[in-house]
Image (cartoon, grey):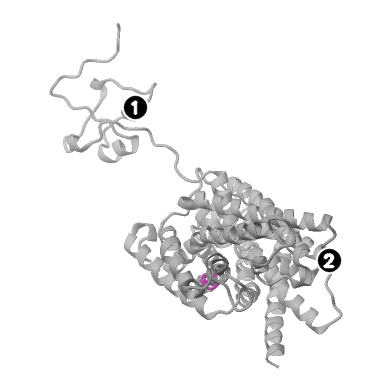
Amino acid sequence: MGSNYTQIPKDSFVELELRDQIGSQNPKSKETSPIFKSDDFVKSDELEYDDDIDFDNLPLVIVKNQPSGSGIYGAVFNLATSVIGAGIMALPATMKVLGLVVGVVLIFLMGVLSEISVELLVRFAVQSKSNSYGEVVQHALGKPARIVSEICIVVNNAGVLVVYLIIIGDVMSGSLRHVGVFDQWLGNGFWDHRKLVILIVIVLFLAPLCALDKIDSLSTTSAASVALAVVFVMVAFFVAFIKLVEGKIDAPRLAPDFGSKKAVLDLLVVIPIMSNAYVCHFNVQPIYNELEDPSPKKMNKVGRLTTVLCVMIYASTAIAGYLLFGDGTESDILTNFDKPLGIRFSTALTYIVRVGYVLHLVLVFPVIHFSLRQTVDALAFDGKAPLSESRVRCLALTFVLLALVYLGSTMIPSIWTAFKFTGATTAVSLGFTFPALIALRLSSQGPGLTSRERFLAWLMLSLAVMVSVVGVIGNLYSMRSKSD
């Protein structure tokens, strides 16, 4: 059979390596480097070699570079996991204050505004060639603003992780007002101590996941966490539907009640919590960086799909949870599921809801921890090599942060306390204030903003300032009223 290839002498060596390896080791090699492709073989007598190459250490079989990174849906799951955390458990309680109609409208509007702010953030991060939230803030507003934004990320994410641990501890070991899953299963024992239960969860489950150094490595666990959140929503809707058909659900409130001083104070506290629901901006750039063939268009698609998914889950959870428990809805609705629901198989359903959501939080925790670790590293080791290149520093930061978050979970009494302050300050700043300022400041350095985009940027900035001021005043006044 005829062939264009010459026989290779027995005393010859064949170099088979990737195109970029050839280019770096042998500048004299031709453009058609020998790569194993069906249409890209070259003759042995056409190859030129450098005498300094150690052929013995070159690979024998080479596969062409494959695109690496996260796909669209892996990115959606990671971003959705950044959004759907413990905040979903506080939404039914916000319905108790806002009413169903106003509450659902706010869930939708906050989702739309958050998605717009994500698109603005991606657009100007790409324009300024920034690799993190802090970098794009620095490019637009200077180094002091970057430090402030990174402190906001640290406070917000650390607060969220503390909330996760509080919920895990309360659900599994119980609290003063609620019975834990372990108590119901096993009776009294060492598992009654919340601090011990949280410590065991950190050591056995959270530490191994948090030690991973790429957010793309968490895409599978993120998909599982979203699935568990959907299970919670489906069970809550199923129970609410049955009780509604049986006439066991009271008529819900549809709008806020302004008839009492307490109702007004609750309203001032709830609005910042609602704005906290969609904050995921600290993870936008890490997810974008690990996209396969990253582009603003692809990331915008990720943001829109995530927003649709989160709005559906949030609205469903808020409606079903409030319908189920009415004015008795707790700030953490999981604690409402420690008693019979009034339908068949309610005991099994309560276990599915509580244990399933604890597993959801365990899988969400590493995604929030990832950006917390990256930000702390940027603050503490500015100018050092990237964290991905120092495994020792990565592990050290991981375990130090886990220890600090654990200590915080033993000191803060409830998730409502944590949410109402982070929602009114750091969350609003990260989700709306900084993206709006970035867009308005950098618009003169590129294609610029359309009149509609400029209006939306000013609207976000105005709302963010108003929510922050109202939320802080409301929280302080509420604390003062309780002390009196």
Between 429 and 236, the residue placed more toward the observer is 236
Q: Horizontal and vertical percent for residue 89? A: 65, 65
Q: What is the distance, in whole Å, between disc 1 and disc 2 at their CAs? A: 67 Å
Camera-side residue: 474 or 15?
A: 474
View extreme (left): residue = 11
Q: Which of marks 1 and 2 is in front?
A: 2
Taking the image as drawn, is residue 432 in sight? no
Magenta stretch secondary structure, dominant: helix
Q: Give the range drawn in magenta.
A: 153-159
On the rendered image, what quadrant is the N terminus found in? Answer: top left
Q: Dot 2: what SS?
A: loop
Residue 460 vertical position relative to residue 473 in the rendered view, above or below: above
Residue closest to the eye, 14 or 20: 14
Q: Is residue 166 covered in magenta? A: no
The residue singled out by tag 2 in the image is 252
Query: Label for residue 36?
Result: 1
Q: Where is residue 22 in the image (x, y as percent from the top left)?
A: 29, 36
Q: In this view, does 46 lie to the left or right of 188?
A: left
Asked which secondary structure carries label 1, the reply is loop
The residue sitting at 51% across, 47% down in the picture is 291
